[in-house]
Image (cartoon, helix red, strand yellow):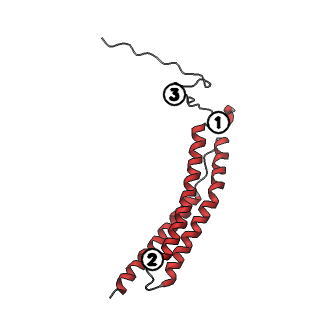
Amino acid sequence: MVPARRQVEPKPDNVRSVSGDREPSDQPLAEAGQGPTTQVELANERTYLAWLRTGLALVAAGVAAERLLPRVGVSWVREVIGITLVLVGAVTAGFARRRWETVDRALRAARPPPRPFIGYLVATAIVVDGLAAMFLMIRAESYRP
């Protein structure tokens, strides 16, 4: 014999679940009179720190590209690759705090977060500089005796 299924009554908004998390509500956070949950705030902070790490990695990649890419052929391309990676890394790290604040304000007002324009900038720089680095390496191979 199969036991009958127990019906679960919906919990009020102020009751926490067994894990301690609030049950999801249909009301936006601003209307409910509460801010974003700690989990959401920490996720936003982790994203902020990830943008800082990305900026630091781009600066390091720019220095490495300028020092390690072959000096054969068009020498100024190597310098442009290094400079653009360092510049994009600095801009990424610089705008990371602004991005964190903008997302935080959007979360508190129950609005969707803005699009990550920094991500578009980083992706573009990586693709363009990667293609230029490949060009340099292919040219260096053709100059070998």
- Residue type at tag 1: Leu
Q: Is residue 29 left or right of residue 83?
A: right
Q: Are marks 2 and 1 in contact (CB under 8 Å)?
A: no
Q: Is residue 84 above or below residue 21?
A: below
Q: At 43% across and 85% down in the image, what residue appears?
A: 72
Q: Which mark identifies residue 145? A: none
**Residue 96 drawn at (x, y percent):** 62, 56
Residue closest to the far bottom? 145
Q: Is residue 89 left or right of residue 32?
A: left
**Quick check: 74 above or below 63?**
below
Give the amino acid at mark 2: Leu
Q: Position of residue 21 (x, y in %)?
A: 55, 30
How far from the left and from the top, in percent, is residue 75?
49, 84
Residue at mark 1 = 29
Residue at coordinates 64% horizontally, 61% vertically from top-left?
A: 94
Mark 3 → mark 2, Cα distance in angstroms: 53 Å
How many other residues sit within 10 Å of disc 2, few (<14), some (14-19) or many (≥20)?
Answer: some
